[in-house]
Amino acid sequence: MTEDTFKLTEGFFRFEALGKKRVKGKEEVVSVYKVLSAKDDVYRSRLGSERMIYSEMVGRDNELHRLELQVMKVINGQGSIVNITGEAGIGKSRLVAELKKREILKDVKLLEGRAISIGENFSFHPITDLLKQWVGIRQDDDHVAAFRKLQNALRNFFPEEEGEALAFVATLMGSRSRVRMPKG
C-alpha cells in the first residue's frame, strides 16, 4: 500500500516498509508498505471519534470550550465526567475528535464510553466501556483474562480495598460469578 493508506491504518496493522517504488498511475516514486499482520492489542471503540475527519468543524466553539474547561479541572486535581448526548448525526463524535487534537490533552488520559440503544440491561454500558479501556480488556480476552486484568488494575489503584472494589466493579461488569470476597 502507499503512504496515504499506511498513515490511515498504521495503528491497526504491523507493516514492513518496502522503500520507494514506481506505482501505476503515479509519475514519481512513492513510499510503499507491506501489511504483515493485524495488531492484537488495539482498542477499537466502534468508529467514534477516532475516525479521520478532514473538514473544519463549524458552530461548536462553545461546546469545545466547555469540554476544555472540564479537562482543566482534571489537570488541576478535580474529577470530571462529561456526558455528551444528542440525536445521531449531530456531531458528538466530531466534538470529541476535535478535543483530542487540542494541546491541553497531551498529559491527560481520555477514556470514552459509548451508550448503545438496544436492550434494557445496558444502562451501565458507557461505564463498563470506560473501565475496559482503563484496564486494557480487549474484545478477544476470555472471562479469566479480563478478570485478571481488572483484578491487577484495582490492586494497583486500591491496594487497601482491592477486594471490596473488585467485588463491586466485577459485578458491574458482569463478572460476579468469579468474585471471591475476602475473609473478615
Image: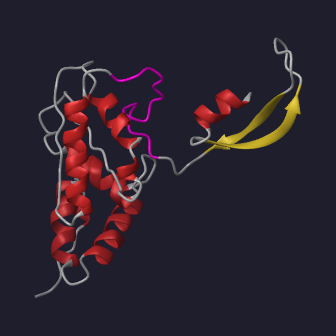
Quadrant of the image for the C terminus? bottom left
> Would you identify the image quadrant in which residue 36 lies?
top right
Report whether 63 appears left or right of 112.
left
Asked whether residue 44 is drawn in magenta, I would say yes
Q: Is residue 52 visible?
A: yes
Please state the horizontal and vertical placement of residue 180, each as a whole percent of the image: 21, 74
28 on left or right of 149 = right
Q: Residue at x 86, y 33 (%)?
A: 20
x, y percent for residue 152: 36, 72
Residue visible at 25% across and 27% down in the picture: 60
Q: How many dots with numbers?
A: 0
Residue 73 sits above or below residue 33 on the image: below
- Magenta residues, as a range? 43-57
On the image, the x and y values in percent for residue 112 come to: 30, 44
Dominant SS type (magenta): loop
Q: Foreground residue, 41 or 18? A: 18
